Amino acid sequence: MKHLGLIAILAAGVAACSAGSPVGQTGEPGGSGATTATGGSSSGMGSGGSGAKPGSGGSHSSGGTGTGGSTSTGGSDPTGGSSGTGGSSGMVGQVLDCPNGPALGSPVFRLLTRREFENSINDIFPAAKGQWQDTLPANAATASGFDNDAGAIVGNQLASALLETATAIGTAVTGNGLNNILSCAGSSADHACAATFLDQYGKRLFRRPLTDAEKQRYLTLFDTGLAASDFKTALKWVIAGLIQSPNTIYRSEIGTVAGNVRKLSGYELATELAYTFTGSTPSDQLLTQAASNLDPVATAKQLLQTDAGKETIQQFFSAYLAYSGTSSVVRTLTNPNSNFADVSDDMVNETRAFLSDVVIDKGGSLKELLTANTTNPSKALATYYNANFPMPSNDYASVTRPPGTGIGILAQGSFLATHANGGYSSPTRRGLFVYYHLLCQPKLTPPGNVPPITDTQTQAAKTTRELYETTHMAGGTNCKSCHQFFDPIGFGFEDFDQGGRYRTTQNNTPVDPSGNVLDPDGNMLFSFKTEEELATQLAALPESAQCFSAYLATYAFGSAAACLGSTSAQGLLDGSVGIVDAYAALASEPNFTQRNAQ
C-alpha cells in the first residue's frame, strides 16, 4: 500500500452509489478553480488587489471532482495592490511513502484566514477588542476540510468587506481608548505622534519594520488627513490603509535565493511560527527574536504550550474530524431516553475535553487518539449514552468506558452523530472517513446508472447493515465496486446509532459490527469483530500514521504538496512521538525554513 495519495480525499468524496436514496450521501465539494485575478489600484492607499475569484468545483451527487483553476494574473504595483496568485487545482496529490525524504514547496504569499485576521487585530489592539465588527466572508474549506489554503487570494467580495472591516477597526482604535493605545495622543497629537504609531503598530501589522518609503507614504496620508480634519480622523484612515495592505493580509513565505533554494528571512520565519502554532500574529518578543537565529522547533514547542497554541491543536481536529457541526444536525432517535438536541453541544465539549486530556495534556500519540478507553462526558451526556455509562465527578471529567462500548476518538458521540443520517446510522459515511482520513486510499469513481433504493427495500431491512448489504454490497449491483472498500469499515460502528449511543440491537434485531479492511487491489488487510478491534488495528497500520502525518502537514503548510512534512510518521506509529510534538516537529522540516528557488 505504498504511494497512497491524499489525492483521494483532497479531490472529492465518493458518495453512496444509490444517489438520492435515503442512505445516499452527497459527495464532498470539488476543489476550487480560479478565474483571472484583478490587479489592485495603484493609487494612494488603495486596498490590495483582488485575487482570482474562486471557480466552482461544485458538489456532485456521486462525489464529482472539481476542476483545476487557471493561473491568475498579477495585480499592479505592490504599493497599491497585491499580486494575484495562481488558482488551486481540484486535483491535489499527496504521496505518503517518501523515499527521497522531505520535499520543498513553492514560495507563496499566504492570505490570512478570517480567524487569523481576527486574532491578529485583537492581539495587536487588545483595548479595541469587541468594539469593531468583522464583516469578512467565511473561508472556503478545501476537500481536506481545512480553510487555510495557501493558494487563497483576495477576491472582490473580500476586498469590499476588508475595506468595511478596516474602517471599523480604525474607528475603534481611535475611539475613547486611544490614549491607552498611543500615549502621545493625549499630549502631543501631531505628525511625530503618528510616526510613533507607525513604528510601534505598523511593525506589528506588517510583522516587520516599515521601510523608510512605506513610513513616509503613510505619514503623507496622515498629514493630508490632518489638514482636512483632526488627529483621530487622520490616524483612523492610516490604520484602515495599513490593515488593507497586502503586507498585513498576506503572510510572506518567499525568502531570498541562496543557491538552489530560497531561505526565509527571520521575520518571515517568526511569522510562520506564530501563525502555524498559535493562529495569530507574532508577539513583540518574537519579532525581536527574529533578528537573531530562532530555533524553530524549540519556539514551536513553546508556542504550543500557550492557550493559543492549544487552541490551534483543537482547530486542527475540529476540521479534520468535522465534528463541530454536531450542534446543528438533527438526529431522530428510536426509544430516546433524552433529546439529542439537548446534549449535542455537550458532545462537542466532550470531544474538546477528550482531546485536551489525551492529546494535549498527556502528549498522546496516534495510538492513544484511536484506542484510549476514556472519554469526558457531561453528566447529562453520560445519562444520554446509557444507563450504565459511568457518571463523571464533574462535567467533562475523564471516565473509563465500560468494556466493549467503544474506544478512542472514533467512538465519540460527536464523530458518530455527524457521520450519520438523520434517522439511522451510515456505514458509508463512517467508513469513508476512515478510508480517506486514516488510510488515504485512492479516489474511487462511482459507476453510472445507479438505481435509487426503493421504499420496499428499506422497509424489508431490519437493520441498517442489512439494507446496505442488500443495496450496496450484493453481487451484481453497480455499487459493490466502490462500497466494498468502505462500507465494511463502516459496519464496525454499527454498535452506535445515529445519535452516537451504544446499542446491541436495532428494531429488536442484533446488530453486527464485524467487517474488514481491503487494500486498493482488493486484498484483505485485516478483519475485525468490533469497533475496538477496528480502532486497535488501524492504530498499528503504517498507512494510518503516514496519512495522519500528511494531514498535519497539510494543515500547517496550507498545501497538500507531497512529502512536505513526513519525518514524524514512524514516531506517530510506534508511539515515540506524540501528536503535539509531531506538529511542533514540522518546524524542523526543510519546507518550514526554505522554499524551492524555481
Image (tube, rainbow, N blue to C red):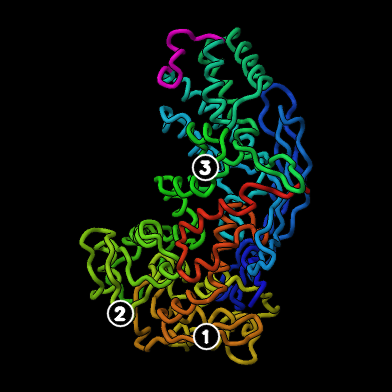
Q: Which residue is identified by label 3?
A: 274
Q: Amino acid at mark 1?
A: Phe
Q: Position of residue 293 (x, y in %)?
A: 57, 39
- How many numbered marks, from 0 up? 3
Residue lying farthest to the bottom in this orientation: 475
Q: From this viewpoint, is residue 345 visible?
A: yes
Which residue is painted at 60% across and 62% down in the image? 566
* Residue range (magenta): 179-191
Which of the numbered marks, if any, corresponds to residue 526?
A: 1
Which residue is painted at 73% across and 32% down in the image? 40
Label 2, label 3: how many angstroms apart (C-alpha)? 42 Å
Q: Give the answer, above or below, for where 418 lies relative to 18.
A: above
Q: Answer left or right for 239 relative to 578.
A: right
What secondary structure is marked by label 2?
Answer: loop
Which of the numbered marks, if any, corresponds to residue 403?
A: 2
Q: Amino acid at mark 2?
A: Pro
Q: Is residue 598 magenta?
A: no
Q: Position of residue 69 (x, y in %)?
A: 75, 53
What secondary structure is marked by label 3?
Answer: helix
Q: Give the answer, above or below, for where 123 lies relative to 557.
A: above
Q: Residues within 10 Å of mark 2 (few under 14, many from 20)?
A: few
Q: Position of residue 312 (x, y in %)?
A: 47, 50
